[in-house]
């Protein structure tokens, strides 16, 4: 083996070792949440802490589901996340298309004003949002679903990301489609969207994860345990009279499964989507 090849192999080994060391603080909490969820209370309370369970106790998950209405709260989170993700994708696609392809007066200024909304902290508008939702009566019964989703049906980040992706679309293809009599909606649905799947998937993954992990808004909005979300349910496990660390970790594991699976299987879409407008 030549000296350059040996040097290349050595540098790769060093890079991988550094990456492994950096990954340990990130991966270990996830690992311990999953392992702690199947441990017995004795294993979890042992000192020094055990990294592997001596016995697998799947009853922690059923106990967590029986302690509070966690299954219903799981469904609430799924409904909230599904509605917000679909609506944000729809609004972001249409707004990005308008900013990228339509001719409008002061389009650049309007887009800049649109992006300014990203600089407004959520803490500054949460009180007006709550007062509005409360005045509309969207904090009781099934109407709570509307209250949970209404303030998040549109967001500037998805519009910005998709606009940058749409700007990379060949103008010649767009002109050819127009010459063939292709209207805006047909061009968007038949040509543009199929070629922009990575960017759309990246926006969808981002919206899903941020909505699924919401805590403060569902906390102040939900008055009925039947309409609280999963993140609130996990915190309720800590306040329950029969709470134990194994039950809490079991609930955390249930909350982690959708987002972890989405990151693992959607990672390539996230990377391709976030870098879609980086090179022109």
Image (cartoon, rainbow, N blue to C red):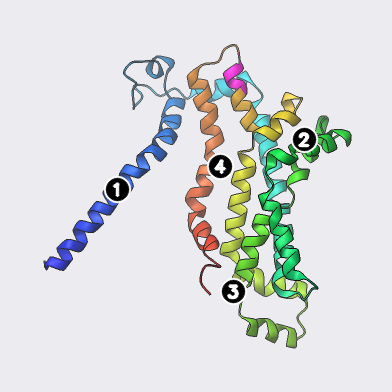
Residue 136: image location, x then y, percent: 88, 37
Residue 273: image location, x then y, percent: 55, 62
Residue in the foreground of this view, choosing between 97 and 212? 97
Residue 152: image location, x then y, percent: 73, 46
- Where is mark 4, residue-wise? 258
Q: Is residue 228 visible?
A: no
Residue at the (56%, 68%) spot, across then down: 277
Membership of 169 in magenta stretch: no
Q: Residues within 10 Å of mark 3 (few under 14, many from 20)?
A: some
State whether the magenta stretch is mostly helix, strand or loop: helix
Tell me which numbered mark, 2 or 4, is placed earlier along the sequence.
2
Q: Residues within 10 Å of mark 1 (few under 14, many from 20)?
A: few
- Where is mark 1, residue-wise? 18
Residue in the foreground of this view, choosing between 167 and 208? 167
Residue at the (15%, 62%) spot, across then down: 6
Q: Quadrant of the N terminus?
A: bottom left
**Marks 1 and 3 in Cβ contact (< 8 Å):** no
* Nearest to viewer (mark 2 / mark 4): 2
Residue 190 vertical position relative to residue 212 in the rendered view, above or below: below
Residue 127 is tagged as 2
- Where is mark 3, residue-wise? 168
Membership of 239 in magenta stretch: yes
Q: Quadrant of residue 5?
A: bottom left
**Marks 1 and 2 in Cβ contact (< 8 Å):** no
Q: Give how far apart the Cα atoms at labels 1 and 3 are.
A: 35 Å
């Amino acid at each position: 083996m030549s000296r350059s090849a040996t040097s290349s192999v050595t540098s790769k080994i060093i890079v991988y070792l550094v990456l492994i060391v950096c990954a340990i603080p990130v991966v270990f909490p996830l690992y311990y949440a999953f392992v702690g969820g199947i441990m017995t209370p004795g294993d979890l309370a042992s000192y020094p802490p055990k990294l592997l369970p001596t016995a697998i106790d799947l009853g922690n998950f059923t106990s967590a589901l029986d302690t509070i209405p966690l299954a219903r709260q799981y469904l609430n989170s799924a409904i909230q996340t599904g509605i917000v993700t679909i609506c944000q994708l729809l609004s972001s696609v249409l707004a990005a298309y308008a900013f990228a392809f339509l001719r409008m007066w002061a389009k650049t200024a309007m887009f800049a004003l649109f992006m300014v909304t990203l600089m407004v902290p959520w803490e500054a508008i949460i009180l007006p949002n709550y007062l509005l939702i409360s005045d509309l009566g969207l904090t009781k019964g099934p109407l709570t679903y509307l209250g949970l989703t209404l303030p998040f049906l549109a967001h500037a980040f998805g519009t910005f990301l998709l606009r940058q992706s749409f700007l990379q679309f060949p103008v010649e293809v767009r002109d050819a489609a127009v010459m063939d009599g292709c209207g805006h909606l047909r061009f968007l649905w038949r040509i543009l969207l199929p070629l922009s799947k990575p960017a759309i998937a990246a926006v969808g993954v981002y919206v899903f994860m941020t909505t699924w992990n919401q805590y403060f808004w569902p906390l102040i909005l939900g008055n009925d345990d039947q309409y609280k979300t999963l993140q609130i349910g996990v915190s309720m496990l800590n306040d329950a009279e029969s709470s134990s660390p194994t039950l809490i970790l079991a609930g955390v594991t249930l909350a982690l499964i959708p987002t972890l699976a989405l990151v693992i299987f959607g990672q390539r879409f996230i990377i391709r989507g976030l870098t879609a407008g980086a090179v022109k």
